Structure formats: structure tokens, C-alpha cells
Image (cartoon, rainbow, N blue to C red):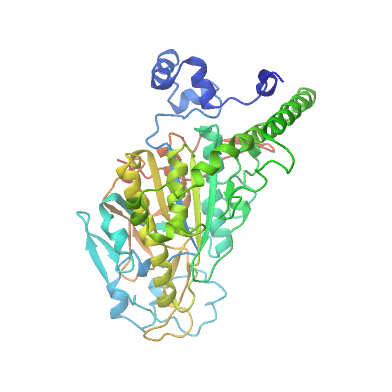
């Protein structure tokens, strides 16, 4: 079957656009001469450039998002509050608590006693960032991190908060951040998807993660996240059916593509071409995926860096190492979800185990990217969906307590990708309950991530059912203070 038949009518992406002009870096320079507005947001809109071309020169090419599902307690990890220890057991002042709504788990509590962290903190690096003793490996890379202590959200329960952070909406059925980046920037590697998802589970109370979090929403289905599993078949339904060899598979796809092309010409439905692209991607992935997923060839020093769990499929450490491999092979957005951070009770025991799960591998990923010269072009993000209360949930004892959901402030960190290293941004009050300096809303965070990849969040738009949608909805500003 003629290859042109298959490719005819497919949506252009950045790779095809630049290839048509020339090859490599020289084509970018030539493009900027022939089309002066090629890397300006105004030019992208006015020239009608197709998705796959950035609005302006990016500082990062890819994102690895280490999502800590369940909401890590910032008071035990990165937001040092000695005043909480001084006031241990005292009622939180009404002037601090204000009128914020509470979850059903603490709304009926008779009192709200403050609880200080059971763990000690120290300052690290030239930035003098406070990091808890639960995170010794992360502490060693403090000068590579931008720690943002002033994140906030409106959502107070896990599912809407998680959905909001990943899609820009609490209701779901919207494209996820990875899908928006796939739509806006296209694919770097024709043999791998532009957006992949890896799941792991810790020892604590695990909030669920759902496929809607990596959904393409109303975008073409080619932008949907591809979930990798830890089993023998990391991508389901990728292998050829029993009794079919590669030649027969190729003939089947060629014939199917020709039929789909006829349907596209008759109906003009772009989803038809998206399906053809997915079939072709699956065919190419059959040879690419086994090589990328094979961790047995990693040298001893890399295994030591990530820890022995990195050779155990499905662990957080293994997924961090896979994230590096996928990213260096051109996957645009690698999303990790690590469950187990929802510590409403027994927090000292559970958070210590969770921190042990993620600390070494998270720091190793940043170090590994840096030593390979990839950190500058890779934005690494670590954090959950909201924070934890300064008061205890339920009964307070010296060695056992819990913390409820707290949307007013939480902490994340970012590294690489043009973000200022060795920086602590934002500040909460002395009880860690309210933001007092440099608040960063979820939409501000999303706008900043897009900006680092050369996308103007106000111009990355998709029209659906008569409305112009974007990841940041109708708000969001780029946090320029943290950009290098």
C-alpha cells in the first residue's frame, strides 16, 4: 500500500513542519528568517501556525511530574514551623483559622489543637532551605531545587483537587496537562507516545487515581496519556495477535489505513486520522517499548544512585528511572503517580515510610538528569494536590496524630527546565495555616509550566462546543520570579 495514502490528510506536527523546511537546528534559524514571528505568541496566532509549533523559544523541552497522590504534609517535609511545637495542644486562634470551610472529617470536632511536627529540620545548601530529616537525599540537592511553599487551591477533597491540578477543572472531562502539551508541541519521537503515565503505591492510605487524569478530553485521542504497567506487557494490547507476524500486521494496517482514509474523505471527521496515527504508533512501539523498559542494562552506579528498588518493576524508584529513560528518548510529558500520602491518622509512622519510598529516587532523578546534561531542558516537578492542617484530626498524643486536608497552602518543588535553582519562594504564617507572601494559585503554576515549554497559556486554546477552552481556564499568571 502506498505510504502517501496513509499519511494523506494527517494533522501536521512540529516535526513534519520543520522537516519540510530543512533539518536540525539550521531549519529553526531558517524558519525565523522566513517567518519572523515564528517564535512569538502573536505570530503563532496571526500566522495560523498549526499545533506543534511553540509560541516563543522554550526553556524546557520536556516535563517529568512526580505527583505525590494524597497530599503530603508540608509541616513534616519542607515548611518548618517551630511555633507549632511551642503551641502544641493549644487551640488554633480564630483569627488564624478564619472562616475557611472544613471537610466532613473535622467539621464536627469539638476542638482544633495545634500539633507540631515530630521530625526535626535543618538548613541545607547556599539557599539555606529548611528540609526535614525525613528527606536526607532531597536535602543534598537543595541548591538544585526551587521550593514553592505558597501553593493554594480551592478544592478541599482529593478527587476534585487532583483533577483540578491535572486538568485545570474540578469537574473532569477536560484534557490533562500532558495532553495539552502534546497538542501544543507535538511529538519528539515518532516511536513513542508524547505523554506517558506510571503508577506506584506506598504503604499509607492510598487515594485512587483514574484514567480521567490522563484523558485527552475534547482533544484528539492521539493526545491521550498512555499508561505503562509493571507486568510482562507494559502497554496493553500492543503485541500482535496470536498467529499474526509482523508482515501480516503491516499489511493489515496498510489496508485499514486505506479504508480509514476513504472514510475521512467522505465524512471529514478528524478522529479518523487520529485513530490511524494511534495504529501506526502502536506498531512502532512494538520495537521501541521493550528497549526503553529494559532496566537490566543500567550500570551499577545508576542502580546505586536510585537504590536497589529501581530494579523492581512497579516501584517508585523503578518508575523514576523509567521516567529518565522515557524523557531522554523524547517523551514530552512523563507523569508519575505515587499513592499513599493521605495521613488522617498515624501520620508519624506512615509519612516516614512514604518519605523513604520517594526521597532517594526523586533526588536521584534530578542528579541523573543533571549529570547527563538533560536537567536544563527537563522540568521536574514534585508535589501533591493540597496541604495539611496545622491542627490535628482526631485525638492528639505525643507519638500519634493526623492532619486533615488543607487547600490554603501547600508545598511543591521544581527543578531544571529554566526554573531558578537554590530558591525558596513564598511564605506561610508562623503556624503554617495561611500564606503571607507570594501566593501561587494552581492556574499560576500551570501557566508557568506551559511558559517554560514555550507556550502562552492564554493562546493555547481549543474551541469545543462553541467555547474557547484552555488549561488555565480564565485565570493564571506566569510566576516570573522563579524563572531564570
Question: From the viewer's perspective, is residue 405 above or below residue 154?
Answer: below
Toward the viewer: 119 or 193? 193
Q: Quadrant of residue 450?
A: top left
Give coordinates of residue 205: x percent, y percent.
53, 71
Image quadrant occupied by the C terminus: top left
Q: Quadrant of residue 139?
A: bottom left
Position of 430 with respect to 192 (left or right) is left
Question: From the viewer's perspective, is residue 71 above or below residue 325?
Answer: below
**As drawn, which residue projects farthest toward the left?**
126
Toward the viewer: 224 or 228? 228
Toward the viewer: 204 or 117? 204
Toward the viewer: 70 or 192? 192
Q: Is residue 285 visible?
A: yes
Q: Is residue 477 visible?
A: no
Image quadrant occupied by the N terminus: top right
Residue found 35% across the figure and 45% down from its top: 369
Give coordinates of residue 5: x percent, y percent.
70, 20
Position of 429 with respect to 339 (left or right) is left
**As drawn, which residue projects farthest toward the top?**
34
Residue found 54% across the figure and 72% down from its top: 103
Q: Quadrant of residue 306?
A: bottom left
Give coordinates of residue 171: x percent, y percent.
62, 54
Q: Looking at the image, how many numbered discs can be counted on the residues?
A: 0
Give coordinates of residue 298: x percent, y percent.
40, 48
Amino acid at each position: 500500500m502506498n505510504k502517501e495514502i496513509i499519511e494523506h490528510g494527517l494533522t501536521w506536527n512540529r516535526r513534519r513542519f520543520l522537516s519540510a523546511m530543512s533539518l536540525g537546528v539550521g531549519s529553526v534559524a531558517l524558519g525565523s528568517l522566513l517567518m519572523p514571528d515564528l517564535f512569538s505568541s502573536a505570530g503563532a496566532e496571526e500566522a495560523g501556525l498549526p499545533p506543534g509549533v511553540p509560541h516563543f523559544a522554550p526553556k524546557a523541552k520536556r516535563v517529568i511530574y512526580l505527583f505525590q497522590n494524597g497530599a503530603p504534609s508540608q509541616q513534616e517535609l519542607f515548611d518548618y514551623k517551630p511555633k507549632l511545637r511551642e503551641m502544641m495542644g493549644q487551640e488554633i486562634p480564630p483569627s488564624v483559622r478564619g472562616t475557611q470551610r472544613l471537610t466532613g472529617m473535622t467539621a464536627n470536632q469539638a476542638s482544633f489543637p495545634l500539633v507540631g511536627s515530630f521530625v526535626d529540620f535543618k538548613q541545607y545548601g547556599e539557599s539555606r532551605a529548611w528540609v526535614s530529616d525525613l528527606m536526607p537525599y532531597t536535602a543534598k540537592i537543595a541548591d538544585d531545587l526551587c521550593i514553592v511553599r505558597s501553593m493554594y487551591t480551592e478544592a478541599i477533597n482529593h478527587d476534585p483537587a487532583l483533577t483540578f491540578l491535572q486538568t485545570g477543572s474540578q469537574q473532569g472531562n477536560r484534557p490533562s496537562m500532558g495532553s495539552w502539551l502534546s497538542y501544543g508541541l507535538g511529538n519528539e519521537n515518532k516511536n513513542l507516545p508524547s505523554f506517558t503515565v506510571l503508577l506506584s503505591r506506598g504503604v499509607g492510605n492510598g487515594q485512587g487515581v483514574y484514567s480521567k487524569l490522563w484523558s485527552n478530553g475534547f482533544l484528539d485521542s492521539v493526545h491521550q496519556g498512555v499508561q505503562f504497567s509493571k507486568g510482562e506487557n507494559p502497554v496493553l494490547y500492543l503485541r500482535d495477535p496470536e498467529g499474526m507476524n509482523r508482515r501480516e500486521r503491516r499489511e493489515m494496517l496498510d489496508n485499514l489505513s486505506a479504508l480509514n482514509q476513504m472514510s475521512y474523505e467522505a465524512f471529514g471527521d478528524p478522529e479518523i486520522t487520529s485513530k490511524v496515527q494511534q495504529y501506526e504508533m502502536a506498531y512502532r512501539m512494538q520495537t521501541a517499548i521493550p528497549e526503553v523498559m529494559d532496566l537490566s542494562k543500567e550500570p551499577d552506579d545508576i542502580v546505586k544512585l536510585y537504590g536497589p528498588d529501581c530494579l523492581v518493576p512497579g516501584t517508585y524508584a523503578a518508575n523514576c528511572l523509567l521516567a529518565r529513560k522515557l524523557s531522554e528518548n523524547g517523551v514530552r510529558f512523563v507523569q508519575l503517580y505515587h499513592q499513599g500520602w493521605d495521613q488522617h491518622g498515624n501520620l508519624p509512622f506512615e509519612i516516614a515510610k512514604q518519605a523513604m519510598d520517594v526521597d532517594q529516587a526523586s533526588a536521584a532523578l534530578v542528579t541523573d538528569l543533571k549529570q547527563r546534561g538533560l536537567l536544563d531542558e527537563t522540568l521536574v516537578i514534585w508535589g501533591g494536590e493540597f496541604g495539611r492542617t496545622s491542627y490535628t484530626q482526631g485525638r492528639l498524643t505525643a507519638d500519634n496524630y493526623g492532619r486533615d486536608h488543607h487547600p490554603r497552602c501547600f508545598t511543591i518543588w521544581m527543578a531544571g527546565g529554566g526554573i531558578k535553582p537554590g530558591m525558596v519562594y513564598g511564605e506561610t504564617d508562623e503556624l503554617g495555616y495561611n500564606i503571607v507572601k507570594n501566593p501561587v494559585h494552581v492556574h499560576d503554576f500551570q501557566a508557568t509550566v506551559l511558559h517554560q515549554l514555550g507556550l502562552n497559556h492564554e493562546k493555547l486554546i481549543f474551541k469545543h462546543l462553541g467555547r474557547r477552552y484552555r488549561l488555565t481556564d480564565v485565570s493564571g499568571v506566569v510566576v516570573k520570579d522563579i524563572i531564570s
